[in-house]
Image (cartoon, grey):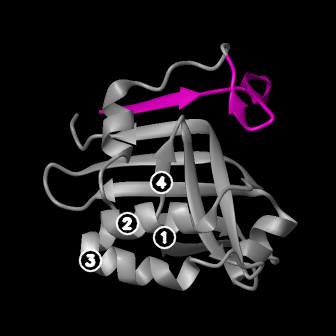
Amino acid sequence: MDCDYTCSESCIMSGEVNSKMPTIPNHINEFLSQTLVAVVSTVGADGSPRSAPIWYHWEDGSAYMFTGRRTLKWRNIMRNPVASLCVDWREPPYRSVILDGSVEEVQRPLYDLVLSMAVRYYGEEDGRAFAEGYREQSDDTVIFRLTPTRIADYTGEE
């Protein structure tokens, strides 16, 4: 079964969900809260799609990610601040949620976000070790938020 949840641009104000935006169904919030590696797609300078695997943190109807400021991913976002994030389960029963939306840089403590993600993806000990490299806030790393204007839910069922 495929379902689309679309929000008009007027539903999204300053990156915050307002009361006009439809509620994201619980099954989508639960799916996006799992520990899955996503694929983020941006628009390249030549207009072609560019995709890369990425960790994400789902919170309050938005996906938070981090990357280096010098990466192709971030350069693409700076040029065209839209992206698509595909989060999927690649074993039966297949499932995916695709978020299309606007992207913006957000100011929040880098170490806290990286630590929470690293512990989630690597486990407590290895996650803390990984996050140590991000303890000092750096201008070389950017946190960004994808606020969906469209959510597609594919369950692999007819």
Q: Secondary structure at mark 1?
A: strand
Q: Neighbour class for label 1 at 10 Å: few (<14), some, many (≥20)?
A: some
Q: Secondary structure at mark 4?
A: strand
Position of 13 compared to 52: left or right?
right
Q: Tag 3 or tag 2, which sits nearer the N-term? A: 2
> CA gap, disc 4 to disc 1?
10 Å
Asked whether residue 108 is in view, the answer is yes
Which residue is labeled 3 in the image?
A: 125
Which residue is located at x 76 percent, y 66 percent?
A: 77
Q: Position of residue 131 (x, y in %)?
A: 46, 77
Q: What span is in magenta?
A: 1-18
Position of 121 compared to 13: left or right?
left
> CA gap, disc 2 to disc 3?
19 Å
> CA gap, disc 4 to disc 3?
19 Å
Using the rendered view, name the quadrant where residue 82 is placed. bottom right
Q: Amino acid at mark 1?
A: Ile
Which residue is labeled 4 in the image?
A: 57
| Labels 2 & 4 near each other (Cβ < 8 A) | no
**Residue farthest to the left?**
92
Q: Is residue 89 above or below residue 151?
A: below
| Labels 4 & 3 near each other (Cβ < 8 A) | no
Mark 2 or mark 3, whichever is nearer to me: 3
Which residue is located at x 53 percent, y 85 percent?
A: 133
Front-lying residue, 155 or 72:
72
Q: Amino acid at mark 3?
A: Glu
Q: Of the numbered discs in the image, which one, if any, rests on residue 54?
A: 1
